[in-house]
Amino acid sequence: MENDDGSQTGSTGGEGFSETISRRHLDDCDNYENIGGLSQKKEIEVLCFFLFLLCYIVILIGNLLVMISITCSQLINQPLYFFLSYLSLSDLCYTSTVTPKLITDLLAVKKTISYNGCMTQLFTMNFFGGMEVFILTGMAYDRYVAICKPLHYTVIMTRQKCAAMIAASCAGGFLHSSGQFLLVIFLPYCGPNEIDHYFCDVYPLLKLACTDTSRIGLLVIANSGLMSLVTFAVLLISYAMILYTVRSYSVKNRRKALSTCSSHITVVALFFAPLFFIYFRPATTLPEDKVFALFYTIIAPMLNPLIYTLRNMEMKNAIKKLWCHITGRKEMN
């Protein structure tokens, strides 16, 4: 609609994110939207700045260390570690789409992001997030084959098949992110232009649309919710069959078999639990969403390297060899 002064009360795409409706004719690169942070208190924001900066440094070091240690050792030839190296890569890329912007905004007086930047963040975050979901599913399948079909493991989990599963994970992530992106890119937006979140996600963006988004909300649930549900069901089936197989093992062999799965189960729980809370409900935003989102944007990528290395002697030895190679020290037995 058009007001008496010639300005419009609604616009499409990036135009709706200008600071005022009367400035809607600005180019997309000048259109900004405000982002709601984790807290309105400056003291808490400063504390969060140092905390999240430390977390991001740990994420970078931990995931790079896992990737390099696996790539530069014979572990890269084992399917489990082949998947783990790509899981670390997706963790690193996933958190890097959100965390650096979050850290800088914590000290900013005005927290803004351009429309193009917002859409880019939305697409890349969902791409790497979807990719991680499928990689975790592939790792569960690897554990199923290793425990339930050990004699056929090397025949089934070939390097070509593992590479194909990674490619399929990338394709699945792309389809997922494209679906999320297309659901919001063509919506008509109008003021206010403030997102009640610390990054651009679908549900907060739907709140800014000046049209009925109930059907789109259902499509979001179908896209994100069902993807998480189906992959989680595959994970549950894989581990149910693993438990069924190891029931006849001796206590020692059963403990050894399940120890290789415990790390993966912990990572899955950290990643999927907040996703279910956010996406398995009507298309609304809650204050708790920001806290739950921290689990899969910061906490899980930070803890994953620790979870996979603390109880894994092969990873510890690979990291030790890498450290000895870097420092020039002789390896101690």
Image (cartoon, grey):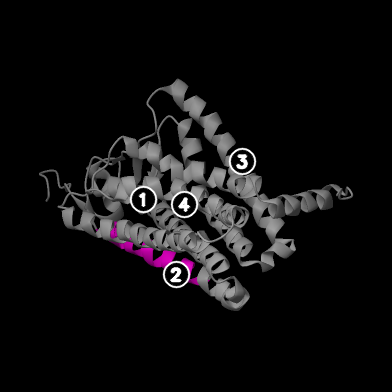
Q: CA distance from mark 4 to mark 3?
A: 20 Å
Measuring 46% from the left and 27% from the top, which residue is drawn there?
45
Q: Secondary structure at mark 4?
A: helix
Q: CA distance from mark 2 to mark 4?
A: 20 Å
Q: CA distance from mark 2 to mark 1?
A: 25 Å
Q: Residues within 10 Å of mark 4 (few under 14, many from 20)?
A: some
Provide the residue designation for mark 2: 171
Provide the residue designation for mark 4: 268
Provide the residue designation for mark 3: 58
Provide the residue designation for mark 1: 115
> Please, what is the three-letter code of the amino acid marked with disc 2?
Ala
Q: Given the current orientation, which residue lies at the most extreme top position?
A: 43
Residue bounds of the magenta highlight: 167-186
Do the CB atoms of the residues marked 2 and 4 lie less than 8 Å apart?
A: no
Q: Nearer the viewer, residue 20 or 119?
A: 119
Q: Nearer the viewer, mark 4 or mark 3?
A: 4
